[in-house]
């Protein structure tokens, strides 16, 4: 599966509703604003219910300072879905995604993200974005299927 930025399908909404956190006088992070860019899975028949967060800051943009996986469902959900207890453990909750770029501030940024997650409204927003994104992927898939059927019909006519 490919994780794709939410803004590729919902540009305006993605930037309007992107969370960020401002750090000032922190112990572990340089002062500045940190944005949590959302990426969702674009596989049409996949319901993995998670988001990948790319932490970016205007100062170093477009460099990704941390890549975080966040799964909001229960451990049982991911076990059933992945058939693998170890993988499931890494999918649930917020963890650093070790397959993707991390910086020396990654752990501190993970903590910052966990702090932001305490806001239930933000979690609900991520779920809503996931549903919207999956809906768009589904619609694109349907449209592609329709096009293929039409092309086949046209070919038969000739
Ligand atoms: Zn998926």
Image (tube, grey):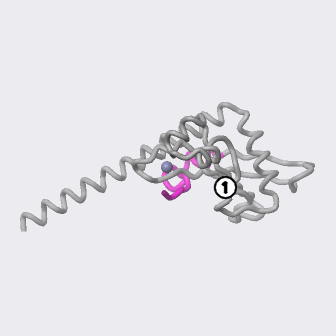
Relative image position of residue 85 (x, y in whole percent): 59, 44
| Quarter of the view holding residue 102 | bottom right
Magenta residues span 1-18
44 is within the stretch colored magenta? no
Q: Is residue 82 left or right of residue 119?
A: left
Quadrant position of residue 89? top right
Q: Say which residue label 1 marks.
A: 97
Residue drawn at (48%, 57%) of the image: 1
The location of residue 90, given as percent across then percent down, is 64, 47
- Identify the residue shown where x is 70% and y is 48%: 95
Return the residue nearer the eye: 90 or 11: 90
Q: Would residue 2 be counted in the magenta stretch? A: yes
Quarter of the view holding residue 111:
top right
Asked if ligand 1 lies within 8 A of label 1, the reply is: no
Q: Nearer the viewer, residue 151 or 83?
A: 83
The residue positioned 65% from the left and 36% from the top of the image is 122
Q: Could you tell me residue 22's position as x and y percent?
A: 81, 47
Q: Residues within 10 Å of mark 1 (few under 14, many from 20)?
A: some
Q: Quadrant of the C terminus?
A: bottom left
Above or below: residue 62 compared with residue 106: below
Considering depth in this image, is 84 or 35 the residue closer to the camera? 84
- Judged left or right of residue 147, residue 136 is right
Most extreme residue toward the bottom is: 158
């Amino acid at each position: 599966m490919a994780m794709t930025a939410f803004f590729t399908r919902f540009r305006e909404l993605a930037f309007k509703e992107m969370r960020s956190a401002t750090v000032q006088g922190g112990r572990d992070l340089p002062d500045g604003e940190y944005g949590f860019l959302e990426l969702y899975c674009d596989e049409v028949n996949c319901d993995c219910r998670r988001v990948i967060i790319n932490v970016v800051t205007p100062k170093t943009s477009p460099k990704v300072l941390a890549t975080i996986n966040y799964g909001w469902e229960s451990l049982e959900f991911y076990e059933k879905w992945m058939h693998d207890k170890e993988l499931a453990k890494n999918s649930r909750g917020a963890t650093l995604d070790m397959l993707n770029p991390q910086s020396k501030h990654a752990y501190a940024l993970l903590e910052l993200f966990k702090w932001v997650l305490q806001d239930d409204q933000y979690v609900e927003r991520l779920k809503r974005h996931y549903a919207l994104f999956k809906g768009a992927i589904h619609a694109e898939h349907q449209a592609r299927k329709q096009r293929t059927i039409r092309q086949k019909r046209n070919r038969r006519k000739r």
